[in-house]
Image (cartoon, rainbow, N blue to C red):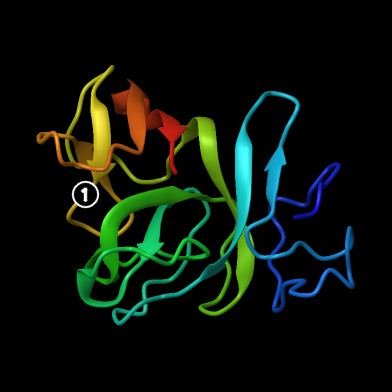
């Protein structure tokens, strides 16, 4: 894993540094970055899923798991709810093409570009049923990935694994 100073969070990449040969120039898959405000980011690959859901900066992503199988893949994310295991991964910082690489925010306060499916300030949130959405966690078995800070303004506090 490489440490980045001033990572280019809104950039997209067609490749990732898989060997360490480009250390410090191109992020490696799974690399993490923490900014001066304590927000944490992870470098991942985006997959549009079977529905071909386009990536949009500010949209929530979920760990990619074909046909909703359990998410064992923690370096590939999607906004396609049907191709996720229902585990929130983070918020897109850019709009990569399917197969490209980018940064997602995994911890800290974030403003989503999509309204919550349901929820009020203070509610624990989990993956929604629609693409890129979050909803109130209603069961103890839900994978909580955020808390609503200001639900009407789409502000959440991310706690993604």
Left or right for 45, reference 67:
right
In this rendering, the answer to whether 112 lies above or below 62 is above
In this rendering, the answer to whether 121 lies above or below 55 is above
> Which secondary structure lies at badge 1?
loop
Q: Quadrant of the C terminus?
A: top left
In this rendering, the answer to whether 157 lies above or below 128 is above
In this rendering, the answer to whether 114 lies above or below 62 is above
Q: Quadrant of residue 17?
A: bottom right
Q: Residue at horizontal 30%, vertical 26%?
A: 151
Left or right for 38, reference 138:
right
Q: Residue at horizontal 74%, vertical 74%?
A: 18
Q: Quadrant of the N terminus?
A: bottom right
Q: Quadrant of residue 23?
A: bottom right
Q: Residue 78 at x, y = what percent?
A: 40, 66
Q: Residue 28 at x, y = what percent?
A: 73, 64
Task: Pick out the residue farthest to the left.
Answer: 139
Q: Which residue is mark 1?
A: 128
Classify 10 Å Cα crowding around label 1: few (below 14), some (14-19), many (20 and above): many
Q: Residue 125 at x, y = what percent?
A: 26, 34
Viewer-closest of 154 and 25 = 25
Q: Residue at horizontal 56%, vertical 44%?
A: 105
Q: Residue at horizontal 29%, vertical 65%?
A: 84
The number of numbered badges drawn on the structure is: 1
Q: Residue 108 at x, y = what percent?
A: 53, 29
Left or right for 36, reference 88:
right
């Amino acid at each position: 894993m490489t440490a980045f100073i001033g990572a280019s969070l809104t950039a997209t990449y067609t490749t990732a540094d898989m060997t360490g040969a480009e250390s410090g120039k191109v992020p490696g898959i799974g690399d993490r970055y923490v900014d001066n405000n304590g927000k944490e980011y992870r470098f991942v690959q985006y997959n549009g899923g079977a529905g071909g859901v386009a990536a949009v900066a500010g949209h929530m992503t979920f760990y990619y798991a074909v046909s909703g199988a359990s998410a064992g893949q923690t370096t590939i994310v999607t906004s396609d709810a049907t191709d996720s295991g229902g585990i929130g991964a983070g918020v897109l910082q850019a709009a990569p093409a399917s197969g490209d690489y980018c940064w997602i925010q995994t911890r800290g306060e974030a403003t989503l570009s999509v309204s919550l499916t349901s929820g009020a300030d203070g509610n624990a949130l989990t993956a929604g049923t629609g693409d890129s959405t979050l909803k109130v966690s209603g069961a103890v078995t839900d994978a909580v990935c955020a808390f609503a800070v200001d639900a009407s303004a789409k502000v959440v506090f991310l706690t993604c694994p």
